[in-house]
Every structure is written in C-alpha cells, then in structure tokens.
Image: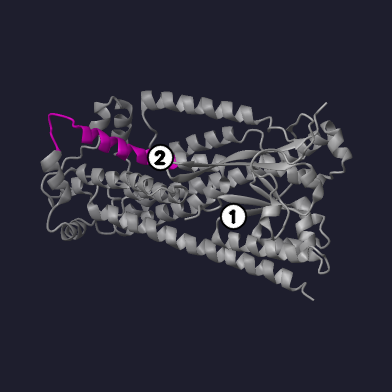
Amino acid sequence: MIPPLSKSVLVDQTFFDALLRPDDPRRAVALVRYEELLADYESGSTLIVTHDHALAETVDPARARRIAAICDVVPIDGDVRREIRRIRADQTALVAAGLDDSQLATIVLLVRRHLDELVSFDPALREAAIVERRRQTEAAGRRFRTRRRGRVFGPERG
Amino acid sequence: MTAVEPSIDRGNAEPDAGTGPISTSSTPRHSLVARDPFTRARITLVSGYVGAYVVWFVTQGVIIDRISVTIAVVVLLVLANVGRPARRWVGLAGDVILYALMWLIYEESRGIADRIGMPLQVESVRNIDRALLFGNDASVVLQRHFYDARHVRWYDVVGSLVYMSHYWLPIAVIVTLWIRNRRQWVRFMRRFATVVFVGCIMFIVVPTAPPWMAAGGDRQIPLSALEPVKRITWRGWRHVGLHGFAHAWDTGRDWLNNVAAMPSLHAAFALFVVVFAFPWVRRGPVRAAMLILPVTMATSLVYFGEHYLVDAVAAWILVGLTFLGWNRVERAQRRRRIARSRLALAELAP
C-alpha cells in the first residue's frame, strides 16, 4: 500500500515548454516523463506541484494551465516572494549566474515546501546543485529508508 | 529532494544522489534558501499552547463540549499560522468555518431529534445484539464477570483511558494534519465529516437507548429491557486522579444526547484514526497492534454499558464504507483531471 500523497514533484517551466513545442527535441523525453507522472498521480501516491510564474512564462500559458490540471498551482506570494527578494539582495553571485524570478521561485518552493523532486530541463537549476540525500539502511532483514530534507547549495554568502 | 532532468534513463538523471552536492567546487557551501523567520515564533507559540493545555488537562480535565473544543482548536491554528501569507489565512478561515459547522450540526442533531420525535429504539437493538451473541447481553455478561464494586481493576483504568481518547485523539490528529500537511487534512476531514454527518442522521432517525438506559439507568426514561447494568465509565479516571475530567464528563452528561447510541462515534473515531494511518505503516505486526485501540474501545464501551456491540459494528461498517466511497470519489477526480490534461496535450499533436 503506497501512502497517499507521499511524494511531491515540482514541475517547472522548461518541462511545460518541452511539452508545448511540437518541434522541441526534448519532447519525446518529456512525454515519457509526463506519462510517468500521470501514472503516479492516478495512483494517488504523488502530489504534482507547479507555480504560477512557471506557467505564465511558458510559450502557451493558457494551454500550459490546462495541461497543469493535474498540478497544484502555487501562487508565488508571501514568504516565497520575500525569500526571492532576500536571495536577490544577498546572493549576488547567483543572480549574476542569471537566475530569474521563476527559477528562484522553483528553488525556494523546493526547500520551503519540502518537495521531494524537481522535474526540469533547466541546466541553471542543476548548476544550483539541488541535492537529494537519501540513506538506505538494511536492518533486521527489513529495509528502512530515511529521507533527509534536501538542501540547495549556492556560493558562499558575503 | 532530487533535481531530475526528464530523462528516460533515470540512472543518468540522478548523479550522486546519495552523498552530497552535485557541484564539484571546493568552495565552502551553505543553504541558499533561509529558514522562514516566523518558524521559530510559531514553534514557540504552539509549544506554549501545548504546555498550557497539559496544565489545564491535569487540573481541569479534557474539554469535551464541541463548541469549547472548536474554540481551542481555532486558537491553536491561529498561533500555528503566525506570519503566513494572507491567502493561507483566508484558507484557514474557510476550513475553520466548515469545521465549526460540522460540530454545530452534530450539536443541533439532538434538538432536531427531540423535535421530530422518532420512536426510541430499545428492544430492537438489544435483540440484534442478542442475535449476534447467541442470546447473551454483552454488557450484562461482562459486568457480571469483571465488575467489582469494591475495587477498581486495571482493566477499568485501561478502558476509561481508551474511552477518554475519543475526546482528544481525533482532534489532535486534525490539528496536526492542518499544521503539517493541509492536503492530508482535507482527505481526513472529508471522511471524518461524512462519518459525523451520517452518524447525526442516524441519531435523529434511529434514537437508540444505550444498555445503561435500557437497564433502567435514566430516571426520566424508566426502562427495563436489560438486567441491571451500571454506567461505570468514570471509575478508571477517578482511580488515576483525573477527577477534573470525571467531573467534566459527569456534568456533560446532562446536555449530551444520551440516545445517540447507534452508531457509536467512540468506536467509529477509534477505528477511523487507525485506518487513516494504515498506509504509512508498512509492518504487519505494527498494524495489528494499532487495531488494539478500536477493539479495546469497543470492548470498553460494552463493558461500561455505554453501547451495544452492534453499535460498534455499525460504526466500523460506516467507517469502512466512508473510506471506500471517498477513495473512489478521489480516484474519479484524478482521472477527470488526467483526461483534461491529456486533451490539452493531444490538441497539440501534428
């Protein structure tokens, strides 16, 4: 029995763009991943999340919203918006690396909402080194999985 | 969390998933995203509230009337949401209104039952119980074998404490879920409200005398459908020094709906919490141990003369049907959304 909503996946703008552009070279890969997400979603085990910045900046926002019918669309406001502003003020090296508000929103949401996985084609987010720490332990003939909260690492502050 | 590039080869998609940062730079690193500055304030406020509640519990007992419980829950949720965005407060207000409405309907069901005046079920439920138990009256038999008027036994205490869990366990789960994971809270509350709502309808349509009343325990409704059964729920609390709770429960009996016996919400909630938690428990023995709660609750209810066995069985069936029903509804919702998503994508196909 899989616990309901036990896994959370954040889908970003680049993934929607790959789905929305029929001539995108990444589309075949995106479609396979999309089908996997649908299967996980249908089973009830996975919560799929995106944010309004990601949808608004796709090549076809209206259609992206319809495709995102399976997603919880998180508005970027409140603490997430505040944190983006703070990162912009503090993390000059990161800003210089060219991360826009949508990418920062993705990073902040991943950490603040404790989301498990990011589905993205964005190399900049991988540059930001989003890391999963998982430890699998064999004990007493049973497998336990300890999932530690992820961290987003960036250049040294100040 | 994992940064997964949408790759068919998942092995390539998760480089260095087990140990540390992907970046190979030797620069010292730190968390890019800071902790929410209000987190500490919320933890402090909620901890203070829990501490105050424990003091109240020891001195005054558990709050059992639904209106006071709702107020207590609202205060806790307000403290747990300090510093959250306005959108979340709006959501909280909506959730609290629905939650309070649920308990208001529950409280009002007694008045509606009095106005409609459906006939009180006494022999019918007793007879069903006898049919289930080969002609025996479970409360009578249990009290005959285990009740000792001069001494409070260990099982009296265990039964009383399990009975008392009805007043705090579901509420604690509801509040915890709201604070930790509102989506799970929604799943919980859909099912919980359904059980309460169906229970209320049955209390109105099928008002049922519990065993202690059927045995003549209520002076206003003199009945003699059973051999004498004492209402001994309070003995365990007094024995362990929970006089405050015993007093609150004793006072509450005056305004509680005494003929709201079918189905037993005590039995329903005990099973409900366990069934809801089942998917997160992988080990069979732990699951079996969890079932001790509803079984002990049902046994205690019968032993204390609070319910017939059939009240508990009806409650368990109600819980089972509620979970099955909502599971189907939620699956259908997900399939509709998948169909909408697929349609939007299919329209793009060349």
Subunit of label 1? A
The relative height of residue A135 versus residue A41 in the rendered view (above or below) is above
Q: Residue at 53% of width from left, 61% of height from top? A: B330
Subunit of label 2? B
Circle 2 residues within 10 Å: few <14, some 14–19, many ≥20: some
Q: Is residue A77 visible?
A: no
Please tell me the numbered disc located at residue A46. 1
When asked about the image quadrant of residue A61, the answer is: bottom right
Residue stretch in magenta: B147-171
The residue closer to the viewer here, B5 or B102, is B5
In this rendering, which labeled residue sits more in front, label 1 or label 2? 1
Q: Residue at 36% of width from left, 49% of height from top? A: B271
* CA separation in Å, label 1 and label 2: 27 Å
Q: Is mark 1 on a helix, strand or loop?
A: strand
Q: In this view, does B230 lie to the left or right of B83?
A: left
According to the image, what is the colour scheme of the structure? Answer: one colour
Could you say where residue A20 lies in the image, as x and y percent from the top left?
79, 65
